[in-house]
Image (spheres, coloured by chain):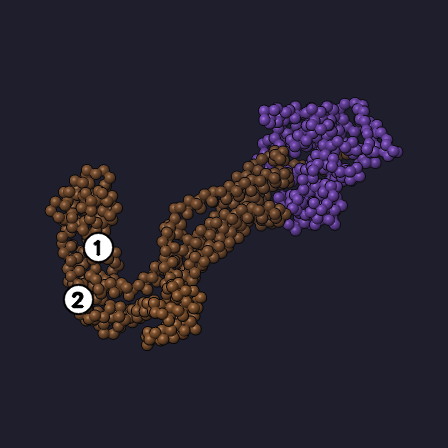
Chain colours: A brown, B purple
Amino acid sequence: MLGRVDVKAIVIGEQPRLGFLRTLRITVDGIRYRLFRALVTVAVIAVAVAFLMNILSEGIIKRAVAANTRERIALNREVHRWSARLTTPTDRDTLLALLATAEDGDPLLEDARQFGGLTPGELAALRTAAAEARVYGETIERMNYAYRRRILRGATGAAAFDTLASPDGWSVFIDGVREITGVRLPFPASDLEAFAATWPAVREKLVRIRAGQADAIATLRAMRRERPIMEALADADGAFGEAIRAAGFHLDASQAPHLAAQAQREIDLRFVERSIDLRTPRQTVARAYDILPGDVTLPRLWRYLADRTNAARYLDALAEEDARPDHFSVARLQELSAFRREAALLERAERRTADMGEGWMGLGARMGWLLLVSMLVCGIGIANAMLMAVTERFREIATLKCLGSLDGFILLMFVMESCILGLIGGLAGGLIGALIGTGRMLVAFGAVAVPALSLGALTQGFLASLIVGIILAALAAVYPSFRAARLAPMEAMRVE
Amino acid sequence: MSTSVLVPEASAPARAEGGGGRRVIIRTVGLKKIYVKKGVRTEALCGLDVEVYSGEFISVMGPSGSGKSTFFNMIGALDSPTVGRVFIDEVDVAQLTAEELAYLRCQKIGYIFQSYNLIQYMTALENVTTPMAFGGVPPDEARRRGMDILGIVGLADRWFHRPIEMSGGQQQRVAIARSLANEPAILLCDEPTANLDIDTGQEILDILRRLNIEKHVTVICATHDHRMMNICDRLMWIRDGQIERVARRDEVKVRVGRIGGQTSGAAGAGERKA
């Protein structure tokens, strides 16, 4: 043994890095070996992500529902807007708001220009003034009522400007503003003073527009004689439509048939809702539901009419009372019922989306705060799980270091592991959250929610919550594994 | 089972000058390790000067708590000394960067632990090929070499088993195979037979001896096992963090007690000598 020559020499060289894929394989093997623990961690992440995704998806759907509903309700109420325009001259405040907010090319603007006999230049100046009035008007409206009463005689809107433009109105106002500490103007007082000086001219134009509209309305009233406006509007694509145009209102020819149909529907709806006060129809419905005739309500009536045979029975009942209109058919009744029930859904959706939060993906400040806290809690939960996982694997880490692994490998291994867990948890949580959110919205809004389900926006929210899940898990793993990787092998083995 | 009493005849110095010009592969200078935990100071090693020659089989003996394992960790570059230096092939371990340390542990030193320390989620073959992967050996070659090494320790047909499916002796043999993965120059064994029965322990010792003779690996073995004396070149006793005695094997006489006519590891088994 003494004469041995071929002993191994030691030359210190550079340690190569292990490839990404091999690290991945080792990591996956490790996860599969500790499947139960991994599943628990995945569950924690999934819960966090599901919560986030639930809130996001509900926000997305709710926002889409709100937009759809508003649009459709506005469409359904088109005929009501027309009946108002054709019977009552627009008051000054509404006119100011219209001039301030209407987009270029709005037919209502054109109407206003014609009624007032304004040139396009004058109209543009009036719109600028209206926009200015809107800013001042909002400030005045927000004022404490007691103060407003003292400095503006309690007036708001156009009346407030009247007060300001009156002989000693401005001095009373400005003295009050200086005296009362609770009143602050977010704009220079001189601007408002200048506007008040121009107000009489603006007012004169507004009055002219109003007067022009009143003349047109008088003409139309003479035209339709004693006919109610709704009935007249049912003829919007006929003679009465011509009359409307002749009087100076801007009625699009393509819009007229639609308007007429809506008016007819309004008349029919009102007829059916009033017909329930007749004895035979009311008893028919009461018998079908097995309730007292007094308990027949409108929602019940409309639900009753959804069915074909019911509608036919109701028509017979109407005929018995000699009240059946000629154009009523089973199909028409069903159509009216469908419309009425959908309108009820829309109204309910509108009420329920009234508290919609603003901001990113429909998150309000309150929801944002709730999310932040829940993310924090889940982050700590994941960090705890990872800390435990790393600590109980100190022996393994020490062994790997004895075998010559680099610190980077161990760090990469653990970060990779938590990323994989984060990915799985994120996918599962995102799916669960989206399903719960969609389900809840479908229950809350019914059929109205269906057209609001946009796959694109939901995918966006899904990706966002997935990324949040992965980042949360990766961040939680970095510190403990960094600490473990830096330890000398035997120190790591001693920590038990 | 067996009782054996060591009767030292003569003491040899820790720095064995009788090396006959052989290369010193591990040298420690004034090695001290002091653990401070919760204000309690424990001096595990109090100034060790040791030289180990290349190609040597050396046993480190001593009672529990004598500092054997601490010493073992120091010379294996697994822990850093409080005072003093460790030279491995005249390279100061304290001067190495983290990457160089990893290289040293991967390529030059093989470790065998009392509790095997196999990676639980890897098969026997994967346990053996992992150090090769760290050393940059391509996967196919690593598998081929891993099977060869498993053949050496007699486990070629169990390569696909996980540690949990193997007995202690088999696990320890996998651990030996793993320590040989990158053909190290030094093999450090921390009580390799402590958790094994006599026969299995003997098998492990045989394997170690064979490696020492055939592959010229320097083996340093911390042990309680007196059979080790049959096969080692030198013995070193550590007590209370200090070297009590160093002796060549032929300087140590062992009187072996007999139980039921069974003789345990007879000293001076000449046939084992190369």
Question: What is the C-alpha distance between the residues marked 2 and 1?
Answer: 22 Å
Q: Quadrant of the C terminus of chain A?
A: top right
- Residue beneath disc 1: A93
How many numbered marks does the figure carry? 2
Seen in the picture, residue A449 relative to A384 is either above or below; the reply is below
**Which amino acid does the dot numbered 1 rest on?**
Asp
- Along the viewing direction, whichever of A484 and B182 lies nearer the viewer: A484
Is residue A312 at least partly visible in the picture? yes
Chain letter for mark 2, please.
A
**Which amino acid does the dot numbered 2 rest on?**
Ala
Image quadrant where residue A250 sits: bottom left
The image shows residue A343 at horizontal and vertical percentages of 36, 63
Q: Residues within 10 Å of mark 2 (few under 14, many from 20)?
A: some
Seen in the picture, residue A330 relative to A442 is either above or below; the reply is below
The image shows residue B273 at horizontal and vertical percentages of 81, 35
Q: Earlier in the sequence, mark 2 or mark 1?
A: 1
Q: Residue at x 41, y 46 (%)?
A: A368
Seen in the picture, residue A316 relative to B24 is either above or below; the reply is below
- Residue beneath disc 2: A218
Q: Which residue sits furthest bottom?
A: A326
Left or right of B262 on screen, residue A156: left
- Along the viewing direction, whichever of B237 and A239 lies nearer the viewer: A239
Is residue B206 at least partly visible in the picture? no
The image shows residue A199 at horizontal and vertical percentages of 15, 51
